[in-house]
Image (cartoon, grey):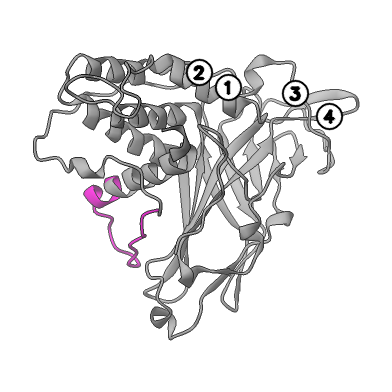
């Protein structure tokens, strides 16, 4: 069994789960702001990352290459989905014993990552021979138009969106001495704090993570939304500013089974779209590529963890590609078919 946050209709993000995020910024005067401030819509257009997004030149080029018959474009799109998922994610492995752990992955739904989700979704629906939408039997709309439609829906929430995924190597109680393994996260105690000491709590949270999660029943995922700006002293203050370099998610405590753990944190490199290096080499077409992997999956990948062992690069690449397939399934529902 797999649990995830519900999603709204086409290209909409669904209900969210609460998490604390610290945003590291510099160059901003330090001024403490209370945690329970009302949200507002920043007068700065660039404050909303989904409203101010720029179309990725590489994503658009991959789409055009595919429409022009490139054999490697589909593989390229999927590879970039995995790379972006890995870049905009961080994970923490919390050991239960020498052989078992719980992994918590945090993924920021950056506009570029969302664009690669849209790109893979569109390419999966276009017949490679006729370039016709296989569901609607009409020519597929322009990639840029689909991205704009998606971003408009996301920007309407006026939130920064993160996906939280909790997994473990085995979901059988026998792996934990026949015990039902539970995970407890203090959702309501988590905050998003900027470098200028602005504290915000999530606007929406997926209440499944407020429960005593029985992880042996299956992985758990959901989406959390945090305000982009808050009102203080009659001014609308942007939480994340131009100097932000790192998104750090901090949890004051996590309890696995009967074992309380100390604070945990996740750091995700944060760069504006203007500063991103969007260059990458085009992969050589691989006729033996496992094309069946290029699709959505409802469950996140199962982590493989052996203490002090080196990760296999191939397995690690496939892990983030599969996590990207999972993010794809969360972001885009089947109702738009």
Q: Secondary structure at mark 2?
A: helix
Which residue is found at the position 68% from the left and 56% from the top? 187
- Identify the mark nearer the N-term, 4 or 3: 3
> Residue 170's quadrant in the figure?
bottom left
Q: Which residues are magenta?
A: 300-317
Residue 7 lies left or right of residue 18; in this view the side is left
Q: Are marks 2 and 1 in contact (CB under 8 Å)?
A: yes
Find the distance from the CA under tag 2 to the CA under tag 1: 6 Å
- Identify the mark nearer the N-term, 2 or 4: 2
Give the residue pinned by disc 4.
Answer: 231
Mark in front: 1 vs 4 = 1
Q: Secondary structure at mark 4?
A: strand
Find the distance from the CA under tag 3 to the CA under tag 1: 15 Å
Mark in front: 2 vs 3 = 2
Residue 148 is marked as: 2
Find the distance from the CA under tag 2 to the CA under tag 4: 28 Å
Which residue is found at the position 57% from the left and 52% from the top? 265
Q: Position of residue 231 (x, y in %)?
A: 83, 29
- Identify the mark nearer the N-term, 2 or 3: 3
Is residue 95 in view from this perspective?
no
Q: Quadrant of the C terminus?
A: top left
Q: In the image, is residue 306 part of the stretch drawn in magenta?
A: yes
Give the residue pinned by disc 3.
Answer: 41
Give the residue pinned by disc 1.
Answer: 152
């Amino acid at each position: 069994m797999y649990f995830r946050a519900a999603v709204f209709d086409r290209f909409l993000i669904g209900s969210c789960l609460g998490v604390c995020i610290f945003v590291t910024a510099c160059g901003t005067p330090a001024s403490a702001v209370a945690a329970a401030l009302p949200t507002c819509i920043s007068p700065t257009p660039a404050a909303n990352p989904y409203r101010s997004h720029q179309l990725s030149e590489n994503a658009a080029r991959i789409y055009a290459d595919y429409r022009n018959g490139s054999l490697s474009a589909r593989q390229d799109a999927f590879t970039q989905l995995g790379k972006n998922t890995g870049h905009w994610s961080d994970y923490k492995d919390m050991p239960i014993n020498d052989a078992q752990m719980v992994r918590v992955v945090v993924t920021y739904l950056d506009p570029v990552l969302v664009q690669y989700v849209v790109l893979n979704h569109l390419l999966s629906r276009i017949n490679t021979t006729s370039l016709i939408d296989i569901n609607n039997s009409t020519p597929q709309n322009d990639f840029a138009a689909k991205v704009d439609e998606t971003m408009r829906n996301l920007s309407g929430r006026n939130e920064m969106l993160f996906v939280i995924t909790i997994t473990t190597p085995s979901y059988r109680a026998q792996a934990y001495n026949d015990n039902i393994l539970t995970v407890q996260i203090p959702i309501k105690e988590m905050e998003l704090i900027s470098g200028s000491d602005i504290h915000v709590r999530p606007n929406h949270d997926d209440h499944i993570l407020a429960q005593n999660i029985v992880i042996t029943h299956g992985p758990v995922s959901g989406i959390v939304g945090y305000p982009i700006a808050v009102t203080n002293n009659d001014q609308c203050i942007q939480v994340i500013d131009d100097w932000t370099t790192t998104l750090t998610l901090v949890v004051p405590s996590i309890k696995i089974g009967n074992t309380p753990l100390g604070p945990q944190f996740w750091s995700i490199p944060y760069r504006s779209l203007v500063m991103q290096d969007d260059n990458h080499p085009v992969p050589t077409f691989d006729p033996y590529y496992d094309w069946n992997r290029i699709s959505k999956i409802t469950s996140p990948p199962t982590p493989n963890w052996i203490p002090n062992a080196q990760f296999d690069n191939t397995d690690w690449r496939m892990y983030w590609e599969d996590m990207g397939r999972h993010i794809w399934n969360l972001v885009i529902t089947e109702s738009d078919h």
